[in-house]
Amino acid sequence: MAGLTSRFARSWQLIKASRAVLRADRSLLILPALSGLATVVLVAGFVGLAISNDSFMAALHRHGAMEDKTPFYAVLFAWYVVQYFIVIFFNTALVGAAMQVLDGGRPTLGSALKLALSRIGVILGYAVISATVGVILRIIAERLGFIGRLIEGVLGLAWTAATFLVVPILAAENVGPWQAITRSTALLRQTWGENLIGNAGISLVMSLITVLIAFAGFGGGALLLVNGLTVLGVALIAAAAAAILLLILFTAALTGVYAAVVYRYAVVGKPPVGFDDALIRDAFTRKGG
């Protein structure tokens, strides 16, 4: 219980310190919003394409040989490539802007997007690699049943850990996608290992806040509607939905800032101004030996 409490407290301190960076330039929140908007457009486009493609729909519901699902996996791979490209592109812009803020600069939306555009070839390459990994994990999960899903989960966590610093590396260094992956793995191994407790802590805190907002907003709104207070009920539900949307954007930006901080600490050996050395170091579990 004490360990859980200290972990929660450390995560809260991380949020407050990272929030100071976001407060320095709120335009950073625009980048996750653009990423979300592009993803919505992508989902609509792919859903329309899939529904209109008879071969894809047939393969989706087929449980025969591997080659029978080729159209499904082909579309899935294309979906992963485009989706990952969008997310990585805007994350690179976000992390690059966060690094400028940490250096005392004043990034603009234009400068952040310009940085991402300058890395567009590498971003596409990394998106293809990530899509390939995603499809392979999906095939393993489907072909091996419960064991396959366990393998997918373990390998997925390992991949996430190994690539945690890839986006900051893409934003800060002139390297290729494979080099970024191997460098990310090396940086984590030489410093804190693979247990990204701090990042998980941010997710835990934000998830808790989201649940509380949803419970109070949607639950309270439903009670108001049931009791005939329609205007107040609709207003409360709408406010809760807006608050959750803003929280999602804030969490995405906060995660980008945290990734920039971790990368900077791994390379330079000390955190930027506003971040406690012990706080960042203890957010990860060192390997023994």
Image (cartoon, rainbow, N blue to C red):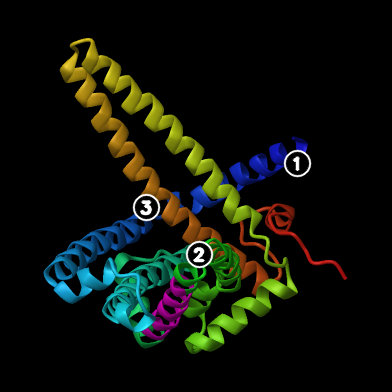
Rendered image: mark on residue 3: 1
Of the two numbered discs 1 and 3 in the rendering, the one whose residue sits closer to the viewer: 1
The residue located at (22%, 73%) in the rendering is: 56
Q: In the rendered image of this protein, does residue 272 appear above or below residue 189?
A: above
The x and y percentages for residue 140 are 49, 73
Q: Which residue is mark 2?
A: 145
Q: In the rendered image of this protein, does residue 2 appear above or below residue 21?
A: above
Rendered image: mark on residue 230: none
Residues in magenta?
Answer: 123-139
Give the image quarter of residue 164. bottom right
Mark with earlier residue (1, 2): 1
Give the side of residue 25 with respect to residue 144, left or right.
Answer: left
- Residue type, mark 2 in image: Gly
Disc 1 and disc 2: Cα gap in Å? 35 Å
Q: Which residue lies most toward the right here?
A: 289
**Pointers 1 and 3 in contact (C-beta within 8 Å):** no
Q: In the rendered image of this protein, does residue 131 appear above or below residue 28?
A: below
Q: In the rendered image of this protein, does residue 71 appear above or below residue 48?
A: below
Quadrant for the N terminus in the image? top right
Q: Which residue is mark 3?
A: 26
Q: Nearer the viewer, residue 129 or 38?
A: 129
The residue located at (88%, 71%) in the rendering is: 289
